[in-house]
Image (cartoon, rainbow, N blue to C red):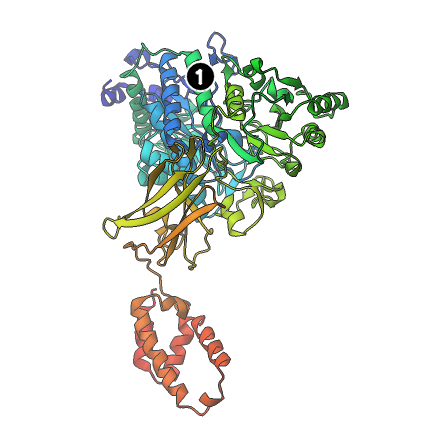
């Protein structure tokens, strides 16, 4: 495809038409020039390709496909290789079904446990989210199928999502809500980016030139096309100028006509339209030139792969010598999720699963007793179901309760109103634990839940929404066929009110203030030393690991030097297992208000009993930096940083220190109101001030008042002086007769 030749031959109307969909899932073709349409499909965790025998606004049933674990689960794997494998499978499925772009992954930060779409998102931590996304994107695009990383950006609630403005300062945006996108764009190069519905500081994401063009394209180097979320276009011409290339779905020609008129009346330069067309054709050409008609969608094989992935994701939250289960024990599975597991969320990512595997069916040969415990269709406590469950629990050695959040509790389109389980589930747990002290709770949920019964049970297993094969994976973990290795990608607070966004979440009308700033998730809880139910990064195993010999080495030049961290990890238990070492960087106490530590590295390493492996991590300048709004750039404060390595943000096993050196001087603009303590950080100002202070000290020591002045008074005067603005200091310098020094200080002031 000769793209430049095609652009020259296309009419204005054809160019405008190419910038919007033909229907819900296809772009327009230009048959006259041999430009085909291409199809996009939902699917961060499975292929949600619509059945095209009926095109009812895109809401008809999708084809049978394989539902893999959702983002809430896959991020808890802490496994980059698995994420690449997931992408690899999805890319092959897309080729088999002639889908050119799959809409995902979704990397928005989990600001609050209440967001209805949290099940689809990865983490409260942008580094983890970015690493997961980048590897999934690489896997998909290895098949010459595009991804559409979404939703760019600050889409952290469903409430009023098409009108609400996410209001935050630049540092909060840069440190929390943009890095996952930045990492993926720079390191995985997704073919497309999907902009979000919401406004960002008052400007709709689709028409936000600052972020779509200045940051995404010019700063990060994104060279694909930007597509609107479905129905996110606000003003078609403004959106196009801002950098939103493709409108989806179809507008039935209305917005195409606006583009044509804007070009004709000079409002829209033809160059802007041509560039959008060029980006869209480039993606189309990449797919068409690499079309693989031999690809096969093997649903049975992919189901088995989905189970393996679910095994990697399951998190063992609590285990008081009750797991793994023994096949010789009498066991009861209680709760309808044991037979009908909740394995995915609702909305645009909902997969028409090819098959669903329950834990009860997977254990059919184990003669496990069963009771419903609750109804799936309501939240009511049914005393007869509770009584049945209690009677069965009394008769077995161990009771395993399958509970969680029903479909009606979390979905795209609405947010949760609380962080609790249905009361019928809570009552079931309390009743069963009251008659059987060997009770295990298995959770099926897309985001954290409160656990008022936590002290009454001996074990808790978090499966999240683990895909269509979650039942088999759960059973294998429960019986020890698989050693659990998942770790939480988000903090579980004790109660909703503990969450840092609690007072501001959802906002007032269309204004949502991100007043907690960078203190999201563990950055808040750990800095405040607040009790949590389970910390970020937490995950137990059926074996134990020790950490030792932590080292850090610097290499490279002053501007680009890297730090290599290495640590020895040993499996000190009796079974093979996978450790998840996490590297946190703790900054020195400086001028910036910063979290106590931040995740900057992780790995997943498999170890046989008694085996030791050395694991290494690379830390670059960004690992130590914060975003300084004065210089509009990343800045590494001088000082000693602590490198922490552990099993969670609260389980730090070993530490070391380093004093990074980066040639990134921070220029402070000197005004007449710059205070003395800040001036002392600037070499040219420091020298003059030190000489003035020395002269003042000599005058004071020679005065009659010197002997009358106590130490505390002297300290007070120095403190007052350090906070004194330059204008006052200059005046005092003149008063002392030091005119030459006063003029030197005046010369430092910038207009």
**Residue sitting at x 51%, y 15%:** 352
Where residue 488 appears, as percent x and y from the top left, is 50, 36
In the rendered view of the protein, which quadrant contains the C terminus?
bottom left
Please give the count of numbered marks on the rendered protein.
Answer: 1
Q: Is residue 552 above or below residue 207?
A: below
Q: Residue 122, percent across and down?
A: 47, 33
> Who is closer to the viewer here, 435 or 416?
435
Residue shown at the point (69%, 20%) measured from the top left: 375
Which residue does the numbered mark 1 point to in the structure image? 304
* Quadrant of the rendering where the N terminus is positioned: top left
In the shown orientation, is residue 643 left or right of residue 711?
A: left
Q: Is residue 15 visible?
A: yes
Residue 200 screen position, x and y as percent = 47, 40
In the image, 35: left or right of 115? left
Q: Residue furthest right?
A: 383
Where is 597 relative to 678, above or below?
above
Out of 171 and 556, give the one closest to the viewer.
556
Left or right of 394 in this view: 37: left
Question: Dot 1 lies on which element?
Answer: helix
Q: Nearer the viewer, residue 30 or 175?
A: 175
Up-down relation of residue 566 to residue 255 (above or below): below
Q: Kindly give the residue lying farthest to the top in the view shown.
A: 53
Looking at the picture, does residue 304 appear above or below residue 569?
above
Q: Residue furthest bottom?
A: 704
Residue 645 spot, x, y in % from top left: 41, 45
Q: Nearer the viewer, residue 464 or 675?
A: 464
Task: Tell me if mark 1 has few (under 14), some (14-19) or many (20+) residues whose alpha carbon lies within 10 angstroms of its own.
Answer: some
Res. 58 visible in picture:
no
């Amino acid at each position: 495809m000769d793209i430049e030749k095609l652009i020259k031959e296309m009419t204005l109307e054809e160019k405008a038409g190419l910038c919007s969909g033909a229907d819900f899932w296809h772009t327009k073709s230009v048959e006259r020039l041999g430009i085909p349409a291409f199809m996009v499909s939902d699917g961060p965790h499975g292929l949600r390709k619509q059945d095209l025998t009926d095109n009812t606004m895109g809401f008809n049933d999708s084809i049978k496909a394989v539902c893999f674990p959702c983002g809430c689960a896959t991020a808890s794997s802490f496994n980059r290789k698995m994420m690449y494998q997931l992408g690899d499978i999805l890319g092959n499925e897309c080729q088999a079904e002639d889908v050119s772009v799959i809409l995902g992954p979704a990397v928005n930060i989990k600001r609050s446990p209440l967001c209805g779409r949290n099940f689809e998102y990865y983490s409260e931590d942008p580094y983890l989210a970015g690493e997961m996304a980048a590897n999934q994107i690489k896997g998909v695009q290895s098949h010459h199928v595009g991804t559409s990383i979404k939703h760019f950006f600050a889409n952290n609630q469903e409430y009023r999502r098409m009108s609400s403005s996410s209001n935050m300062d630049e540092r909060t945006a840069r440190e929390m809500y943009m890095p996952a996108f930045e990492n993926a764009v720079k390191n995985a190069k997704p073919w497309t980016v999907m902009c979000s519905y919401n406004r960002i500081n008052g400007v709709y994401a689709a028409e936000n030139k600052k972020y779509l063009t200045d940051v995404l394209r010019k700063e990060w180097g994104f060279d694909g096309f930007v597509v609107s979320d479905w129905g996110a276009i606000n003003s078609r011409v403004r959106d196009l100028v801002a950098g939103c290339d493709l409108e989806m779905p179809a507008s039935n020609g209305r917005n195409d006509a606006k583009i044509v008129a804007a070009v004709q009346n000079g409002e829209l330069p033809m160059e802007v339209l041509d560039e959008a067309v060029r980006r869209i054709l480039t993606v189309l050409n990449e797919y068409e030139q690499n079309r693989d008609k031999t690809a096969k969608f093997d649903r049975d094989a992919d189901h088995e792969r989905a189970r393996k992935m679910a095994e990697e994701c399951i998190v063992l939250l609590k285990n008081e010598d009750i797991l793994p289960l023994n096949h010789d024990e009498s066991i009861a599975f209680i709760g309808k999720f044991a037979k009908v597991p909740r394995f995915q969320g609702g909305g645009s990512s909902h997969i028409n699963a090819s098959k669903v595997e329950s834990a009860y069916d997977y254990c059919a040969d184990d003669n496990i007793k069963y009771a419903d415990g609750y109804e799936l269709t309501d939240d009511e406590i049914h005393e007869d179901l509770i009584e049945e469950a209690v009677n069965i629990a009394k008769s077995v050695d161990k009771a395993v309760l399958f509970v969680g959040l029903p479909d009606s509790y979390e979905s795209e389109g609405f947010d949760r109103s609380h962080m609790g389980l249905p009361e019928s589930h809570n009552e079931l747990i309390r009743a069963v634990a009251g008659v059987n002290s060997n009770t295990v709770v298995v959770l099926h949920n897309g985001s954290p839940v409160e656990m008022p019964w936590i002290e009454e049970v001996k074990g808790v297993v978090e499966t999240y929404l683990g895909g269509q094969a979650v039942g088999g994976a759960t059973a294998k973990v429960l019986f020890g066929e698989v050693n659990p290795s998942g770790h939480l990608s988000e903090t579980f607070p004790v109660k909703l009110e503990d969450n840092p966004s609690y007072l501001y979440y959802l906002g007032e009308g269309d204004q949502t203030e991100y007043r907690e700033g960078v203190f999201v998730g563990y950055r808040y809880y750990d800095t405040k030393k607040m009790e949590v139910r389970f910390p970020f990064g937490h995950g137990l195993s059926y074996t134990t690991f020790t950490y030792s010999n932590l080292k850090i080495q610097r290499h490279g030049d002053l501007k680009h030097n890297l730090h290599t961290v290495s640590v020895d990890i040993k499996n000190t238990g009796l079974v093979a297992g996978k450790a998840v070492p996490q590297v946190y960087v703790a900054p020195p106490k400086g001028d910036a208000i910063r979290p106590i530590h931040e995740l900057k590295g992780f790995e997943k390493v498999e170890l046989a009993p008694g085996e030791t492996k050395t694991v290494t991590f690379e830390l670059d300048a960004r690992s130590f930096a914060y975003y300084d709004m004065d210089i509009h750039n990343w800045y590494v404060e001088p000082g000693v940083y602590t490198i922490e390595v552990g099993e969670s943000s609260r389980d730090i096993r070993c530490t070391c220190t380093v004093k990074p050196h980066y040639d990134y001087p921070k220029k402070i603009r000197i005004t007449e109101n710059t205070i003395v303590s800040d001036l002392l950080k600037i070499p040219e100002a420091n020298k003059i001030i030190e000489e003035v202070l020395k002269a003042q000290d000599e005058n004071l020591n020679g005065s009659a008042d010197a002997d009358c002045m106590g130490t505390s008074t002297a300290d007070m005067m120095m403190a007052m002086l350090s906070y004194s603005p330059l204008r006052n200091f200059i005046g005092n310098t003149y008063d002392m007769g030091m005119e030459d020094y006063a003029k030197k200080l005046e010369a430092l002031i910038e207009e």
